[in-house]
Amino acid sequence: MRRIPKRDAMYLGAHISISESIALAPSRGRSVGCEAIQIFSRSPRMLRKTKPIPPEEAQAFQENMKKHGLARAVIHANYLINLASPKKNGLRYSRAAFVEELDRAQVLGIRDVIFHPGAHLGKGETYALKTIAASLDWSFDHATAPDVFAVLEITAGQGSVIGYTFAQLAEIMKACSHPERLAVCIDTCHTFAAGYDFRTREGYDALLRDVEGTVGLSRVRAFHLNDSKGDLGSRADRHEDIGKGKLGQDPFRFLVNDERFREIPAVLEFPGTDGGYRKELKLLRSLVTGENPPTSPQKPRGRRAGRETG
Ligand SMILES: [Zn+2]
Ligand SMILES: [Zn+2]
């Protein structure tokens, strides 16, 4: 049994495939260097009801998490779920599928279901925010998942997608009758594409002040670490490998060294190959200095801190 490394930083990891069995995800994650994994608990591109997770599979998943020394797992909900849908059937299927997501997380012993808040499809943002809050209430009432958080992911704001500011996420929380069941996932690509510039220390601090003043820093339960192909404020959801996009390495250095986010899962997403994940996790760990250095150009960059794990 592997020891879970004690971290003074985030639990770094990646989105991992569940093909063949959910129980295989922990060893796949460990083999590319994850301390945390994100998975789908079902096919992400179909809304119809799926078979429940067999208890043996759930148990094997939990045993494999321990065996491979993984600290945390989170679930990313199905992409087709739209809790803001103005279409009657669309909303009905979305809510039912979201309940399934919460229930499946509970069965797997996973506490976080990360989801995109929704898209109003022309009905307007006020309508969307209200509908999402109502959908969440409905879902909490119909799920059997008392230990699971619904984790609102900040979006890039493409099309009619809502939730591209932390103030909007806070509004959803306020309108929901179970705000204690809600949390937030910060996707670095989405945040930047939505218009938050945190490429400098000042910008990063301003972003965190915004988060603190809206949803609250303590509500942040996960990060998606993606660089952005699109520029600041482009409202385009286009991920890039860490350091190769418009964000560059600095924002990731601020994040992985931020004490406030210690022991929070932070995962790489698509496009990801095993080799790519391995390299990117190495890069992220090389940015961990154990302190919070300023980013003046005179300082040495990318100092290695011997944080690589097997
Ligand atoms: Zn994401
Ligand atoms: Zn994205």
Image (cartoon, helix red, strand yellow):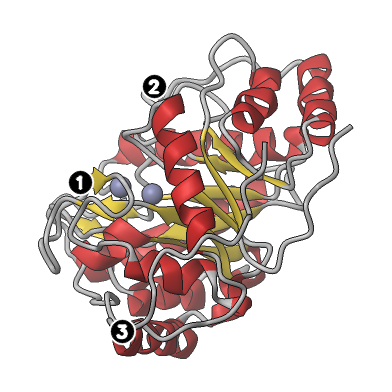
The answer to whether residue 133 is above or below residue 118 is below
Circle 3 SS class: loop
Circle 1 packing at 10 Å, graded few (<14), some (14-19), many (20+), is some
Give the foreground label among 1 and 2: 1
The residue to which callout 3 is attached is 298
Q: Could you tell me the amino acid type at mark 3?
A: Gln
Task: Return the residue nearer the eye: 166 or 8.
Answer: 8
Query: What SS does tag 1 mark?
Result: loop
User: Hey, what amino acid is under mark 2?
Assistant: Met
| The disc label shown at residue 46, or none | 2
Task: Locate residue 242, reporting x and y percent.
Answer: 33, 51
Helix, strand or loop at label 2? It is: loop
C-alpha distance separating marks 1 and 3: 32 Å
What residue sits 53% from the left and 14% below the top?
Answer: 19
Quadrant showing the N terminus: top right
* Up/down of 260 relative to 32, above or below: below
Q: Is mark 1 within 8 Å of ligand 2?
A: yes
Q: Amino acid at mark 1?
A: Arg
Quarter of the image where the C terminus is located = top right
Q: Position of residue 106 (x, y in %)?
A: 74, 40
Residue 99 vs residue 268, the one in the foreground:
268
Q: Taking 95 as reference, is 88 left or right?
A: left
Q: CA distance from mark 1 to mark 2?
A: 22 Å
The reply to whether the C-beta atoms of the residues labelled 1 and 2 are less than 8 Å apart is: no
Asked if marks 1 and 3 touch (Cβ < 8 Å), the reply is no
Give how far across and how far down residue 247 sits, in percent. 24, 63
Which residue sits at x=85%, y=28%?
63
Badge number at residue 238: 1
Q: Earlier in the sequence, mark 1 or mark 2?
A: 2
Decide: marks 2, 3 in contact (CB < 8 A)?
A: no
